[in-house]
Amino acid sequence: MNIIYCCSDGVYSSRIMAGIHLRQLPSDKIASSKEILSLQGFGNKKLKSGVVQYVGDDFYLNSIFTLAVKNDFKIVRKAIQDFLKLYSVSADKFMLVESPKISSPWITVGGYLHDMGFFSTGNKLVVNSIRRNYPSFVKKVKEVLAQLD
């Protein structure tokens, strides 16, 4: 199975979910700021929309990816499904997982500050928003893992 965690930028929410899935981040407590910031690929703003990023293989040997979809998850899902059908690839081999929406505007502000070179302040805002919403990421990953059993 190929599991693709999707969010608007592909480097925050989707990377957190991939980290939880791969046991790089805890699922029984909220990850610390240090754990989040040390996650490889977290906040890598060099990635562009539509770029699939391989993260690793899980304990079931499923390949885990992240994907930046901006606000077009439904369009991306449809495009991937059509592509798979066109090349006679079973859709059962792929699972696209949309990130839970983060209700804090601070993650957006933090991302912009990061882009403008204010890395420390931007990262603090992003990480605080991630930590506040961490239980929703854990819940989503647990739903994915339950489907794999």
Image: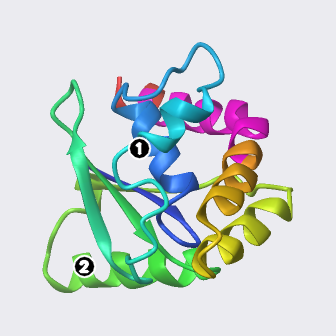
| Picture layout, residue 40 above or below residue 69 | above
60 vs 102, nearest the viewer: 102
Q: Could you tell me the amino acid type at mark 1?
A: Ala
66 lies above or below 45: above
Q: Is residue 1 visible?
A: no
The secondary structure type at the circle numbered 2 is: helix
Residue 139 within the magenta-colored segment of the rendering: yes
Q: Residue at x 14, y 75 (%)?
A: 88
- Helix, strand or loop for the magenta stretch, by majority: helix
Distance from Cα at disc 2 to Cα at disc 1: 26 Å
Neighbour tally class for label 1: few under 14, some 14-19, many 20 plus, Cα within 10 Å: many
Kind of residue at disc 2: Lys
Residue in the picture at 63% in, 82% down: 116
Res 113 quadrant in image: bottom right
- Residue at image x 53%, y 32%? 34
**Mark nearer the N terminus (2 vs 1):** 1
For residue 41, what is the image quadrant? bottom left
SS category of the residue bearing label 1: helix
Give the left or right position of residue 127, taking residue 24 as reference.
right
Q: Is residue 122 left or right of residue 105?
A: left
Residue at x 21%, y 44% (from the top left corner): 56
> Where residue 85 is drawn, which disc sits there?
2
User: Which residue range is magenta in the image?
Assistant: 130-145
Label at residue 51: none
Mark 2: give few (<14), some (14-19) or many (20+) Cα within 10 Å.
few
Q: Position of residue 100 (x, y in %)?
A: 68, 52
Q: Position of residue 59 (x, y in %)?
A: 22, 24
Residue under label 1, please give it: 18
